[in-house]
Amino acid sequence: MSLSREEINTRLNEVFRDVFDNANISVSDSTTAADLEEWDSFNHIALIVAIEKEFGIKFSMVEVTNMHNVGEVVDIIEESKHRNG
């Protein structure tokens, strides 16, 4: 099932809101951990797990290490969905 970038972003926003328990969070491709006070190393792990669960994917350690902003997360999700159909 192929998701549009917009659909991925909508679902990612919900994941961020759930993980950080903040209904006002709105992330974009350029959002980084430095932009969200709550985004620390502990919440980063929770976020990765929640994203994997939401999209039914499993990130590799290399992918997790190379995620520097939300746009890169979206790219990996898109790539994964194309790879796995």
Image (tube, grey):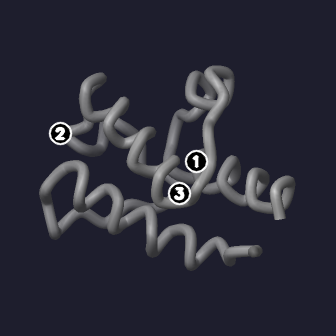
Q: Which mark is residue 29?
A: 3
Near mark 1 (Cα within 10 A), the count class, few <14, some 14-19 or many ≥20, is many
- List the residue tagged with mark 2: 38
Q: CA distance from mark 2 to mark 1?
A: 18 Å
Counting the numbered discs, the total is 3
Specify whether 65 is left or right of 11. right
Please identify the quadrant where the C terminus is shown.
bottom right
Helix, strand or loop at disc 2?
A: loop
N-terminal label among 2 and 1: 2
Q: CA distance from mark 3 to mark 1?
A: 8 Å
Specify whether 57 is left or right of 40. right
N-terminal label among 3 and 1: 3
Tag 3: amino acid: Asp
Along the line of sight, which residue is nearer the eye, 43 or 39?
43
Residue at the image point whose x is 31% and y is 66% from the top:
26
Tag 2: amino acid: Glu
Q: Position of residue 61 (x, y in %)?
A: 62, 21
The answer to whether the residues at label 2 and label 1 have Cβ atoms under 8 Å apart is: no
Residue at the image point whose x is 44% and y is 62% from the top:
12
In the depicted structure, whether residue 35 falls above or below residue 1: above
In front: mark 3 or mark 1? 1
- List the residue tagged with mark 1: 73
In the depicted structure, whether residue 54 falls above or below residue 43: below
Q: Position of residue 65 (x, y in %)?
A: 58, 22
Near mark 2 (Cα within 10 A), the count class, few <14, some 14-19 or many ≥20, is some
N-terminal label among 3 and 2: 3
Helix, strand or loop at disc 1?
A: helix
In the depicted structure, whether residue 45 falls above or below residue 30: above
Q: CA distance from mark 3 to mark 2?
A: 18 Å
In front: mark 3 or mark 2? 2
Tag 1: amino acid: Val
Q: Position of residue 18 (x, y in %)?
A: 23, 59
